[in-house]
Every structure is written in structure tokens, then in C-alpha cells.
Image (cartoon, grey):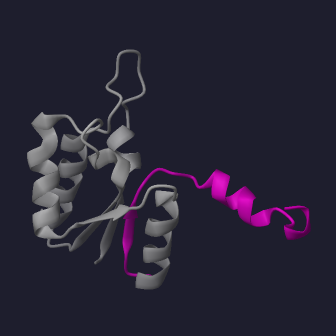
Amino acid sequence: FDVIIDGANVGYYKNNFPGAPKHVNYEQIDWVIRYFQSKGHKVLLVLHQRHLFEQTLPARYAHITKKWKEEKVMFNTPAGSNDDWYWLYAAVWLGRSVKVVTNDEMRDHHFGMLRPRSFQ
């Protein structure tokens, strides 16, 4: 992979307004995937599995997530875990040539790593 997409971050981008849907924007995520694929990139989408639950995934978008699974571009993070750690780890593991698509500033993780261990 040479592009990692923070699916929730991309999917919620500009979707925090009154009356906005409670789910991620699956079409917006798909547009980003297709954009990078059209440029010849191998894309990895990291998306928490809760976005695929029947009660959160509107039926009209099921074909999009099915396509991601078939193309093997999506990694679903398990319940109880923070999806940010997965795309961050993948980016570090893949090295300097990988691009990460997110606008997450990682403030919550940064301060969590700086916290003195003796006080946990």
C-alpha cells in the first residue's frame, strides 16, 4: 500500500452540521479511494467495523462497502479499539513513501503518550 485512508475522518469531513446523517459519508470515502486509484496508487482504507453494522450502514450504501471488501482495500478495526492506532501503525510500518489521508491532528493520542506512566 502507498496510500492509507483514515476512513472515519474522511467520512465525517464536513458532515457535522444540524441534520447531518449519523453515519459516515460512504460516497465521500469511495471518491477518495477512486481518486488515488486513478492515479495508480494502492489504497488501504482503515475503517472501524461499527460503520458496517446493519443498524449503522444504510442499505443504499451496502454496495459500496461490498466493493471495498471485494477489492481488498478495506481493513476493519475491531470493536473496543481505536481505529487511529491502526492507520498510524500501518503508516509507520510502511515507511516514508506512504501517504496518509486524514485531518486528524492526533492531539488525544499525543497527550496520552506524554502522560507519566507512574500515574496511570
Instruction: Assess whether residue 117 is covered by the magenta stretch.
Output: yes
Asked if one can make out residue 95 in the rendered structure from this viewpoint, the answer is: no
Towards the viewer: 107 or 82: 82
Question: For the magenta stretch, what is the residue range?
Answer: 95-120
Residue at the location (37% across, 76% down)?
98
Residue that appears at 57% across and 52% down: 105
Q: Quadrant of residue 42?
A: bottom left
Provide residue 103's location: percent of width, then percent of height.
46, 50
Is 116 magenta? The answer is yes
Location of the N terminus by quadrant is bottom left
Query: Outermost residue, top direction?
Result: 18
Q: In the rendered view, tell whether residue 11 sits above or below residue 23.
A: below
Whether residue 114 sits left or right of residue 56 in the image: it is right
> Which residue does the image show at 32% across and 39% down from the upper left?
24
Above or below, 105 against 42 in this view is above
Q: Quadrant of residue 28?
A: top left
